[in-house]
Each structure stands twice: as C-alpha cells, then as structure tokens.
Image (spheres, grey):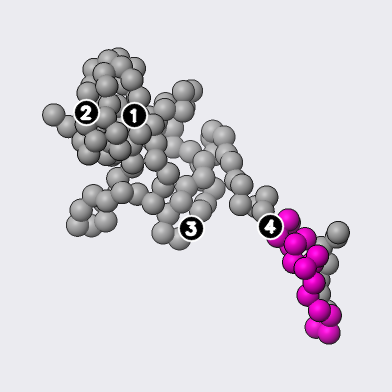
Amino acid sequence: MDLKRVRPDEPVTAAWANALIDALVPLTRWTASFPLEIRSGPSGYGLHLARETKIEVFELAEDLVSGSTASANILWHNGDDWTTADTRSITVADPLGTFEGVTGDRGIAMFHNQSGLWIVLQLQC
C-alpha cells in the first residue's frame, strides 16, 4: 500500500496506520561506519564525525580475567558524581594480559576501531 496523506473527512484505517509504521521502522535502525558515528545524549540521537581516538571511563559489569574480555558500562560525570551513561554496555578487552578486575572496578579504555573492542588502558588498583 502506498502511504498517502489522509484528507480531513477521510477515516484513518488500520491499513493506513500499518503502512505508516512500516515506513517509519527503518528510520529507527541507524548504523554508521567510520568516519561517522551515531551518538546518543540528553537531546536524542545524532550523526557525528567520529573521533579518531575515543577514551572513556568505565565500570566493570562482570569480572575481568587477565587476557580476556568482560562487559562494562561507560560512566559519565553529571557534575557531582560518576553515573552509568545512557548507552548500551560495552565489551572491554585486555589483549596484553595485564589487568584483572572484579565487578564494580572502574578504569579507562580506548576504542579499537578494527576489533570493535574497548582496550583497557588502566584499571583501578
């Protein structure tokens, strides 16, 4: 069905509403590749030029064993304290086998474009 404007005297049908939803759903599935990235913030989602180096403060969501990967959450500073960012969780990696941490430990990680992983640069001691 073609999506067409509804005239003031015309009823809105289920077919018309479903066509509208079908037209809008693809707009919610944004992806981007370097040098672009999609970021979310307080004002919503936006398409931006990617930063060449992304460094973030994180908190482990599970234990990190030396040389492996673990789930973590990016932290943002809200003016008073560090809180979990309004983003999906990330995967942090320790490719050099240098760090071990437990859930709740905080650290600093750099995004590695080729692997798509966040490489741990520092973990609280």
Measured Cα–Cα span from mark 2 to mark 3: 33 Å
| Location of residue 36 (image quadrant) | top right
| Location of residue 42 (image quadrant) | bottom left
Q: Which residue lies furthest to the left in this view?
A: 125
Q: Percent position (x, y) of residue 66?
A: 26, 18
User: Which residue in the structure is indicated by mark 2?
Assistant: 101
Q: Is residue 23 magenta?
A: yes
- The numbered mark, 3 or 4, whose residue comes first in the sequence reads 4
Number of dots carrying numbers: 4
User: Which residue in the structure is indicated by mark 4?
Assistant: 24
* Residue at x 68%, y 57% (from the top left corner): 24
In this view, the residue in front, 58 or 111, is: 58
Three-letter amino acid code of the residue under disc 2: Gly
Query: Does 24 sit above or below residue 112?
Result: below
User: Which residue in the structure is indicated by mark 3?
Assistant: 44
Q: Are marks 4 and 2 in contact (CB under 8 Å)?
A: no
Q: Which residue lies furthest to the front in this view?
A: 14
